[in-house]
Image (tube, rainbow, N blue to C red):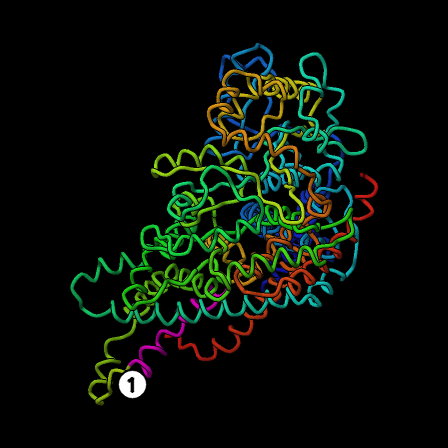
Amino acid sequence: MVARANLSRRSLLAATGGAALALTPLACGGGNGGSGFAQASGDKVPDQYAKRTHVVVWHAYADIPGNALAALAKKFNESQQDVYVEVQFQGSYDETAQKVTAAVQAKKIPDLVTFSEVNWHNFYLNDLLEPLDAYFGSGLKKSDYNQKLLNEGVLKGKLWWLPLARSTPIMYFNKTLFHKAGLPTDRGPKDWDEWYGWTRQLKGIKVKGKQVRMEAYQKIDGDWQFQGSVWQWGGAYSNGLDVTIDQAPAVAAGEWQRKLIFTDKMAYMADSPSVDFQNQLIATLVTSTGGLRGITEAAQKGGWEVGTAFVPGKEKQVVPTGGGGFGILSYAPKDRKEAAWKFVEFVGKPENSAYWTVQTGYLPVIEAAKEQPDLKKLLADNPNFSTAVKQLDIVRKEDEVRLMVPNANILIYTGLQKIWTNNQPAQQVFTDVAGQIRKATDKVRKNIEKHV
Amino acid sequence: MAAVDARVDTGPRADGTRATPARRGRHRRHLREYLLFLAFIVPNFFFVLTFAYWPVVYNAYLSLTSWNMLAPVKDFVGLDNYVDLFTDPDFLGTLRVTVVFVVGIVVGSMVLGLAIAVLLNQKLVGRGFVRTMSFAPHILSGAAIGTIWLFIFDPNYGLVRPLFAAVGADSPNWMTSTTWALPGLIIVYLWKNMGFIATVYLAGLSNVPRELYEAAALDGSGAWTTFRKITFPMLSPVTFFLVITTTIGTFQAFDVLALMTAGGPGSSTTTLSWFIYQQAFKAFDAGHAAAGAMIMFVVLIIITALQARFLERKVHYR
């Protein structure tokens, strides 16, 4: 028994040592070493494309835009002999960014990713994006793009993020309900004060027995639209990295919405204001141009008419841009990065860019796309599709803290939820939010200042 | 032990003679048995170590760092993340929400589950069907449950709307109200849990000896006294098991919550598990997420130990 006990201890130590050695690679697994990145796995490559360079694209587009991107990939695969592009839907922009983060840790990455206007900064700040300037050539030139949108992907003089599904918020309105309320149906409100006057005329208008409200605020990510409101009231979330959301204009914009909800009872927070607009629970909606196609189809099915207008102004008339664009991960091997660029070039051809815009309602990011017959006809026949294009003149790049400070957008929309549902005074909420964002900013300030 | 040791071949003896062949054979058999033991235990040991204990150790390390999950370097910050959390009013609010969430669900599920079990233990028409139906929510996916209940709670089109309309009231904005979101979530988890708890209790009820009830009946015991003095004590091992597993499961509850409220509105349904997810995968702040996870780990160990200490004293094992 003694001998067995001795043997047991020795073996146990050996086994423990072996297990610890086996764990060593795991323990060293964090971060990136700069090499050894494999490609994210996908479906089996079809036999006819087996000899081509395989490019994996992770994207955030479901339904209509997802189908449009898949159609472009199919067309690309059939148009040439060298590259096979596989597009993989990964959920929302946030979910896609989470998966890319996990993929970097697992050293198994996609080649091309669609990042939101917020998410790409995090990957840039951690040196994971490829500068795109050197890829441009005769196939695709920087000058082909809308310069305002293109420049939003430029930092330190280099281009890191290329416009694809770009949008601005626009105001949608239900012409049928406006007509019932005796409101103009051929235009949107001149400014927020006129819009507020219209809420009074809408009182008493009911659909399926329910009072129609004037607008609803988006529970998750509603800070994007609210950023536009803060600008319209003359303020900003931040000036550079100096947080200003607790200043008077932002507070006034917050109080305006609180009054509409709790005093006038003409607005509320919703999981999906877009769905509520389609169900005629609200008469106006400020949301992305990317929803245009879906909303138009819903209106046709529901037997009512939709109109679009510029988002009204208050002190100023200005709106943020938003949406997604392409980024190439720097750790992908050179041949796959070059192959990925071939697909980017293909999507950037005027006819394909026009197809994308016609299908989705996103802005035409390639200037020449506007001259393509299909898009030209759509813009001429359906004025709703031209609203966003015209509104490009008053767009502004988003505030730096929302773009670059991790979690700032969540802190803001969580604060907004407290105003919208809990009737908390805007000053109280924004003082708290500003404090949290300043703390978060201090953690990343050095790195941001190094990269910007 | 001395007798056992005497049988072991310990090599040449002091007088120069060696162990007998019979003893060498025994030694080889013991060695074979030991190697067999190792062959069985090492793979399991390896996987438990790798997938259960190593993540805990690594998480503890991460909780002492500042890391955004992308940077190649993790900065060591000592206990700063813990200090941040315990001095952050929002995190203390998260702990409060977690306590209400867990207590509401555990107590509610146990009471409702036991009530259903006692009811279904009677000879009733359609008992088998009702048993199956009450268990069904337990095997549904969280995503399906979340989607169904979002529809049920919808203040405009939901199934609960007519119930409120019948008494002349509007349905609350369940999932977009800071007042109603947490009670709404608790209701959903009660619905999800109670069928499973009822099923386990039913199995326990079938093991209670009939003669105890016969003796109680002879003594003239009423239904409530019989339940209190016989049924409930005899179910105590089942209760002990269910309280511990439901508490741990509720602390970790995530799927339905993520789909229905995503921690909001505001922070009204931000439980510890949602907080950890949000810090890790929304804010990309691995340090605070890991610190939150360590706090949950320690809290669960303490709760389980306390339950084991105080509840097990009252457990009546047959």
Which residue in the structure is indicated by mark 1? B225
Q: In the rendered structure, which segment of residues is drawn in magenta?
A: B227-248
Quarter of the picture containing the C terminus of chain B is bottom left
Q: Is residue A245 left or right of residue A261?
A: right
Residue B138 in which image quadrant: bottom left
Q: Secondary structure at mark 1?
A: helix
Tag 1: Cα neighbours inside 10 Å, few (<14), some, or many (≥20)?
A: few
Vertical relation: B15 (above or below) A292 = below
Vertical relation: A56 (above or below) A187 = above
Vertical relation: A98 (above or below) B201 = above
Residue lying at the far bottom in this picture: please name it: B219
Q: For this rendering, which residue is in front, A107 or A344? A: A344
Q: Check residue A17 for magenta coloring.
A: no
Residue lying at the far top in this picture: please name it: A81
Q: For this rendering, which residue is in front, A368 or B263? A: A368
- Please name the residue shown 39% across and 61% down the image: B193
Give the percent coordinates (x, y) of residue A168.
59, 37
Quarter of the picture containing the N terminus of chain B is bottom right
> Mark 1 is on which residue type?
Thr
Q: Check residue B234 for magenta coloring.
A: yes
